[in-house]
Image (spheres, grey):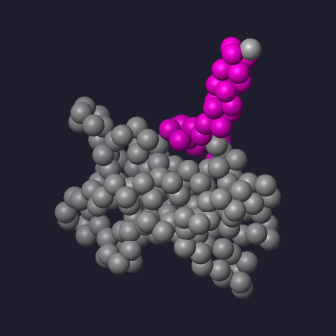
Amino acid sequence: MKRIFVLLFISFLYACSLSTDKIIDKEKLSFSYTDDAYIFFRNIRQSNYDLEILEEADWRIYRHEDRQKGSNQFFNTAIVVNWRINKAYAILEISEKVEKENLTLQWSNPDGQKQGEIILKGLQRQQELAFLTEVYNHILRGNQLSWSPDGQNQTPLFSNNDYKEAFRVSMYDFYRLTGVL
């Protein structure tokens, strides 16, 4: 009897676990969401977000409450939900001084053995989502990310771990909303 209880308990824990460290396959990205996923997001996750409603566009824009604000060099993402057509978009928000098209980020792994670039090629939603997904995957791998928002000086993409975590959580919530996770 004790073994059955332990087995059921372990099964329950496994079923409730969330895979927060799963690398996202860019081929599986989607913008569509189901009603139950949106209800979960609104009832459980929305409390972590600032909400802006654009009635004329039927959009609800969710920005993580811990995102970087009040700076001239920020890198955030917003979840934009168009509830009329059951679509959600992850939108890159950066300071106005930074050119969004062809935005280039540098990455290096923790020991510095590997490095490379992530480039936003085009401004279509699919390209932007692929770019944000690549940033998310590098965060999960523990890689260091940097950029040159002023065009000259290389600085960390996120000035502290809270801002990096706000980005990661926003993307994770987007992937759950759209059924990727």
Residue 116 visible in the current orientation: no
Residue 94, picture quadrant: bottom left
Q: Which residue lies furthest to the front in this view?
A: 1
- Residue stretch rendered in magenta on the structure: 2-30
Q: Position of residue 88 (x, y in %)?
A: 67, 62
Q: Where is residue 106 in the image (x, y as percent from the top left)?
A: 31, 50
Name the residue at 48% across, 69% down. 65
In this rendering, the answer to whether 26 lies above or below 35 is above
In this rendering, the answer to whether 100 lies above or below 5 is below
- Give the position of the C terminus as an image quadrant: top right
Residue 58, picture quadrant: bottom right
Choose between 18 and 23: the one closer to the eye.
Answer: 18
Name the residue at 35% across, 78% down. 70
Q: Position of residue 20 (x, y in %)?
A: 53, 41
Left or right of residue 21: residue 84: right
- Give the position of the N terminus as an image quadrant: top right
Left or right of residue 19: residue 11: right
Residue 22 inside the magenta-drawn segment: yes
Left or right of residue 123: residue 118: left
The total of numbered circles placed on residues is 0
Q: Position of residue 126 (x, y in %)?
A: 60, 56
Q: Which residue lies furthest to the bottom in this view?
A: 56
Residue 142 visible in the current orientation: yes
Name the residue at 63% across, 32% down. 13
Residue 104, picture quadrant: bottom left
Magenta stretch mostly in which secondary structure?
A: helix
Left or right of residue 16: residue 83: right
Residue 66 inside the magenta-drawn segment: no
Name the residue at 47% across, 48% down. 136
